[in-house]
Each structure stands twice: as structure tokens, then as C-alpha cells.
Image: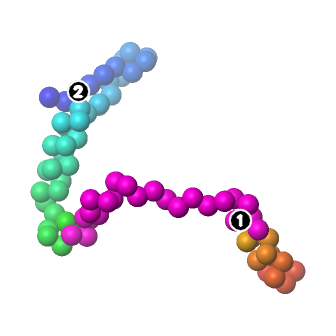
């Protein structure tokens, strides 16, 4: 069953899928994938542990400043 909830205004209804609805839809979509598509999308068991690298903004600003200092006046 599709879960619906009312908005704060009360008149409009919004689709709000349950985790089971989401899982079922994902399985249905993934069922259409070819082996090649499945291999392309596979990220392995470590995919959930990936985080983007952390950078220091000061280092970024210094790099930009150095690049601009090496440039001609109208680069």
C-alpha cells in the first residue's frame, strides 16, 4: 500500500514511501539491469565507508593566490 500524508495546509496529499516500498522499487529497477550495468554500478562493501577528502581552506586560498601571482595582469 502506498503511504500518503497530509501537508501542513491539510488539503494536499504527499507520497511518503515506507522503507519497504523503497526497497521493492529498487529491486524492481535493479531487476532490469544487465550484468554489465550491475558491474558498472557495484561499489563494493567499502562504498558505505567512503568520505570525501577534507581540505584546509587556508591551503586552497594560498594555492589560488599563488596561481594569481604567477599570472600576467590580464589572465
Q: Residue at x 38, y 15 (%)?
A: 10
Looking at this view, name the residue that lies furthest to the right.
Answer: 73
Check disc 2: other Cα within 10 Å, few if <14, some if 14-19, many if 20+.
Answer: few
Q: Residue 75: where, in percent of width, then height?
A: 79, 80
Tell me which numbered mark, 2 or 1, is placed earlier along the sequence. Answer: 2
Mark on residue 59? 1
Range shown magenta: 39-62
State the separation of the CA atoms marked 2 and 1.
Answer: 49 Å
Asked whether the beta carbons under mark 2 and mark 1 sit within 8 Å of each other, the answer is no
Instruction: Kindly identify the residue that appears in the image at 73 percent across and 71 percent down.
Output: 63
In the orientation shown, which residue stands out farthest toward the top? 10
Q: Where residue 72 sits: x, y (%)?
A: 84, 84
Is disc 1 placed on a helix, strand or loop?
helix
Determine whether, in the image, residue 35 is placed left or right of residue 19: left
The reply to whether the magenta stretch includes residue 42 is yes
Residue 48 versus residue 12: which sits nearer the camera?
Answer: 48
Residue 2: image x %, image y %? 19, 30
Amino acid at each position: 500500500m502506498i503511504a500518503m500524508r497530509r501537508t501542513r495546509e491539510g488539503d494536499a496529499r504527499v507520497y511518503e514511501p515506507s522503507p519497504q516500498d523503497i526497497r521493492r522499487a529498487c529491486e524492481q529497477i535493479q531487476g532490469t539491469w544487465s550484468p554489465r550495468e550491475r558491474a558498472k554500478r557495484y561499489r563494493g562493501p567499502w562504498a558505505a565507508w567512503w568520505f570525501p577528502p577534507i581540505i584546509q581552506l587556508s591551503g586552497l586560498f594560498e594555492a589560488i593566490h599563488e596561481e594569481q601571482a604567477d599570472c600576467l595582469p590580464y589572465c
